[in-house]
Every structure is written in C-alpha cells, then in structure tokens.
Image: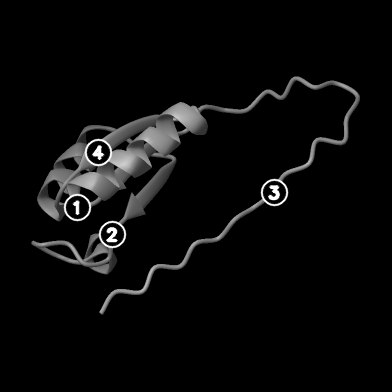
Amino acid sequence: TTTNTTTTTTVTNTSASTETTRKQLTVLLVEDDPSTRLALSRLVDSVLHHRVYVASCAKEALELFSQRSYDLVLSDIGLPDSTGHDML
C-alpha cells in the first residue's frame, strides 16, 4: 500500500511590483511510473519553470547525479531497484 501526501503552499506577493524574479532550479525527478513521471516533469518544467532531469530507477538517478549537481531531488520511495531512502 502506497500513501501519497501532497502539500500545497500559497505564496502571496505583497510588493508593489507584479514581476517576481526567481532562480531557476535544477531538479532531478526519480519516478518509475511513466504517467506520474510525465505529469510531474511537466509540472516542474512548464508550470514552475525549473529545469528537470528525469530517471526511472535508482541506477539512472545515480548516473545523472554523478554528472551534475541538483538543487532539488524529487524521488519515489518505492523504486524497482532501490528505495528513495537508499539514494540519500
């Protein structure tokens, strides 16, 4: 049984300017389910405007991790070849 928990954060801009400057993050997304991987990568890329690298298993994630640094890693806990906890 898998339990998914979603946290929503609302940010309110109280400054007079409507333009917000945010740093584009480099995100590593590790998810073995293709539809979830696609949905999350589109969200992070198109909606949140961050650069996304995707991996479908721990082995791929570790290979990508060895090639560059990431600001954020989003990982499924139950991967076919390891766990998200093991990768930390």
Q: CA distance from mark 1 to mark 4?
A: 12 Å
Name the residue tied to disc 4: 54
Look at the image and tell me in which quarter the N terminus lies. bottom left
Identified at 31% across, 44% down, the residue is 29
Residue 18: where, in percent of width, then height? 80, 22
Identified at 78% across, 41% down, the residue is 12
Tag 2 secondary structure: loop
Task: Answer with mark 3 or mark 4, whichever residue precedes in sequence.
Answer: 3
Name the residue tied to disc 3: 10
Q: CA distance from mark 2 to mark 1?
A: 9 Å
Q: Are marks 2 and 1 in contact (CB under 8 Å)?
A: yes
Q: CA distance from mark 2 to mark 3?
A: 24 Å
Three-letter code for the amino acid on which mark 2 is drawn: Asp
Q: Are marks 3 and 4 in contact (CB under 8 Å)?
A: no
Q: Would residue 30 be seen by someone viewing this image from the given angle?
A: no
Task: Answer with mark 2 or mark 4, whichever residue precedes in sequence.
Answer: 4
